[in-house]
Amino acid sequence: MNFTAIMAIYKFEMARFFRTLMQSFLSPVLSTSLYFVVFGAAIGSRIDEVEGVSYGAFIVPGLIMLSVMTQAISNASFGIYFPKFIGTIYELLSAPVNFLEIVCGYVGAAATKALFIGLVILVTAHFFVDLEIQHPLAMLAFLVLTCLSFALLGFILGIWAGNFEQLQLVPLMIVTPLVFLGGSFYSISMLPPVWQTVTLFNPVVYLISGFRWSFYGMADVPIGLSLLAIGGFTLACLAVIWWIFRTGWRIRN
């Protein structure tokens, strides 16, 4: 394993992040505050508690998941797409590094950025509601796994994308709706039985449910299924990336 190559890619990607640190810091703070104003004040005034947890505190895990997923995808997809766009990807492919080292560099940087955003939102939420984290290690594990898995997905999307518009297609048209419909701002037990069954086909439900369990000890689905879902998704993304580099799909042509 060429750790020098990994760190070179990682530092290059993180340097781009630090150049826009204020934007990266202020954006999640402002968006989180806006969500609390809209959902916490407007809807929260009509819904006092959800399963014994105040509504403002209940939506915090969903807010973190929404930002972490979209940020991990966007950072990873742009990170690998831009070298393709300007043609420097061939210099990277001709360098003495293998695909695993390339993936570790780009995905590691994107996951780090998303993790930073998630922690910023968590700190911001403390100014609005009283938070209780019953299982802090499990919370951190779910957060890190989510950052890594969706950064892997973003890496795949960056290779697949043919233009800048396609980079935003999946985060805006697929991931964000799935998060909103995945119990991020409500418990699926509040839905009619038919829609509860339909919602269980949404993979994001298992991530949000497990993450919320780490805060309040309650979940819409068993915690074992949540771990199985995030683990299976990560392995599936790794398998796709291995196939991409093995075949050269969308990289060498």
Image: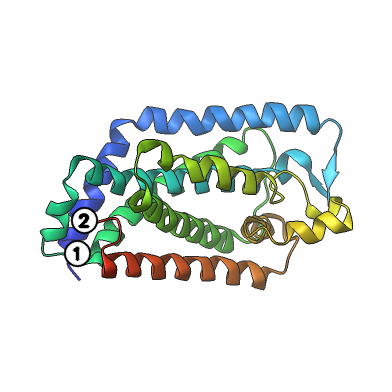
Q: Nearer the viewer, residue 139 or 82?
A: 82
Instruction: Classify mark 2: helix, strand or loop.
Output: helix
Instruction: Say which of 235 and 37 sits in front.
Output: 235
Rendered location of residue 42, percent (x, y): 78, 27
Q: Amino acid at mark 1?
A: Phe
Identify the residue under disc 1. 3
**Residue 220 falls left or right of residue 232:** right
Residue sitting at 63 percent across and 44 percent down?
Answer: 177
Q: Is residue 1 visible?
A: yes
State the image coordinates of residue 251 (x, y, percent, origin top left): 25, 56
Label 2 crowd bin: few (<14), some (14–19), many (20+), radius 10 Å: some
Quadrant of the snapshot with the N terminus = bottom left
Residue that appears at 25% across and 60% down:
102
Where residue 226 appears, as percent x and y from the top left, is 63, 66
Q: Secondary structure at mark 1?
A: helix
| Residue receiving disc 2 | 7
Indicate the quadrant where residue 194 lies: bottom right
* Amino acid type, label 2: Met
Where residue 116 is drawn, which disc sits there? none
The residue drawn where x is 88% and y is 58% is 193
Residues at circles 1 and 2 in contact by the CB criterion of under 8 Å? yes
Q: Nearer the viewer, residue 212 or 184?
A: 184
Image-based side of 30 in relation to 131, left or right? left
Image position of 170 (left or right of 227)? left
- Categorize mark 1 by other alpha carbons within 10 Å: few (<14), some (14-19), many (20+): few
Identified at 42% across, 41% down, the residue is 166
Whole-percent x and y of residue 23? 40, 28
